[in-house]
Image: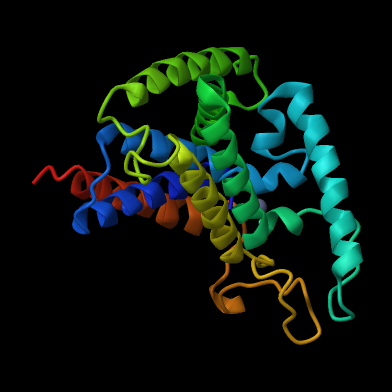
């Protein structure tokens, strides 16, 4: 799938978690719902950091482009080192290491650890990066290839500052999920983990599938491309994605948001 569909599915997924939490009697404070949906929308672009032309790789100028080249090399290296005879020979690392559940878990755990130990600046950095990605993802066509990047960074920095302040107020959820006894902001890892997994599931609906289960060997493959039956798959950016999936994500996200906030 393309950036906007990934970001929308990420936001909808977190709103879905919010609806489930409310139904289970452990509703999220509204800032956790809103910030989580934004982070998840941004994190749903993360696995494509293995491709220089992806939205995430162009979102932070030369910094993200250099990182993308490195991640591509790393992914390709891990692919070559762990592939079984049934896995095809590949020239690059796109849709390998960063498109696995293991990577999503590591990413979520890494950011959770950073948020718990790094204090306010770590929380601000996590919010800034993910809000930038959420804006770039959701406004993909409008922001691509223009000088709008600076505006997006300013907007993201301002939002990060305001949202971090809101979260920090008593009862607003800095300690959500660890219920006051554990370290604050541990939950920031959850929307990051969920976003990456939602991206992987989205990619498995498209033509080439996604090696989510690596390093579990399946038959003669360790990078088995998990996906729907071939006949049900569609090409990234096709009408199914734009006309069917994206409106569905919006409606589902809206309904889940209303349920999560207990507005009825
Ligand atoms: Zn992808």
**111 w.r.t. 83: above or below:** above
Direction bottom: furthest residue? 219
Q: Is residue 48 left or right of residue 30?
A: right
Q: Is residue 19 left or right of residue 238?
A: left
**157 w.r.t. 127: above or below:** above
User: How many numbered discs sit on the rendered protein?
Assistant: 0
Direction front: furthest residue? 181
Q: Position of residue 223 (x, y in %)?
A: 76, 71
At 50% across and 21% down in the image, what residue appears?
A: 120
Q: Visible in this render: residue 133?
A: no
At 59% across and 16% down in the image, what residue appears?
A: 148
Q: Position of residue 107 (x, y in %)?
A: 63, 47
User: For residue 152, which quarter of the picture?
Assistant: top right
Q: Position of residue 108 (x, y in %)?
A: 57, 47
The scheme the figure's colours follow is rainbow
Tell which of 240 and 167 is nearer to you.
167
Q: Position of residue 134 (x, y in %)?
A: 51, 33
Direction left: furthest residue? 264
Q: Is residue 81 left or right of residue 48?
A: right
At 20% across and 57% down in the image, what residue appears?
A: 23
Tell which of 128 and 53 is nearer to you.
128
User: For residue 129, which quarter of the picture?
Assistant: top right
Q: Is residue 213 left or right of residue 73?
A: left
At 53% across and 37% down in the image, what residue appears?
A: 42
**42 w.r.t. 220: above or below:** above
Q: Visible in this render: residue 108?
A: yes
């Amino acid at each position: 799938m393309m950036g906007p569909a990934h970001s929308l599915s990420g936001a909808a997924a977190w709103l879905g978690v919010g609806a489930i939490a409310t139904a289970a009697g452990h509703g999220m404070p509204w800032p956790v719902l809103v910030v989580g949906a934004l982070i998840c929308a941004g994190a749903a672009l993360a696995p494509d950091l293995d491709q220089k032309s992806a939205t995430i790789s162009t979102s932070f100028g030369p910094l993200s482009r250099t990182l993308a080249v490195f991640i591509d090399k790393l992914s390709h290296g891990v692919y070559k080192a762990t592939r079984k005879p049934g896995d095809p020979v590949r020239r690059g690392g796109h849709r390998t290491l960063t498109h696995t559940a293991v990577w999503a878990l590591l990413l979520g755990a890494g950011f959770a650890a950073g948020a718990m130990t790094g204090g306010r600046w770590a929380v601000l950095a996590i919010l800034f990066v993910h809000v930038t990605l959420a804006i770039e993802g959701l406004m993909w066509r409008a922001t691509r290839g223009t000088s709008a990047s600076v505006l997006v960074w300013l907007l993201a920095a301002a939002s990060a500052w305001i949202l971090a302040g809101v979260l920090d107020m008593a009862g607003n959820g800095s300690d959500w999920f660890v219920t006051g006894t554990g370290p604050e902001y541990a939950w920031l890892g959850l929307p990051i983990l969920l976003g990456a997994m939602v991206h992987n599931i989205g990619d498995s609906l498209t033509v080439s599938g996604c090696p989510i289960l690596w390093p579990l060997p399946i038959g003669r493959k360790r990078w088995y491309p998990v996906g729907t039956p071939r006949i049900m798959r569609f090409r990234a950016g096709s009408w199914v994605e734009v006309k069917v999936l994206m409106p569905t994500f919006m409606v589902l996200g809206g309904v889940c948001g209303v349920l999560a906030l207990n507005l009825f």
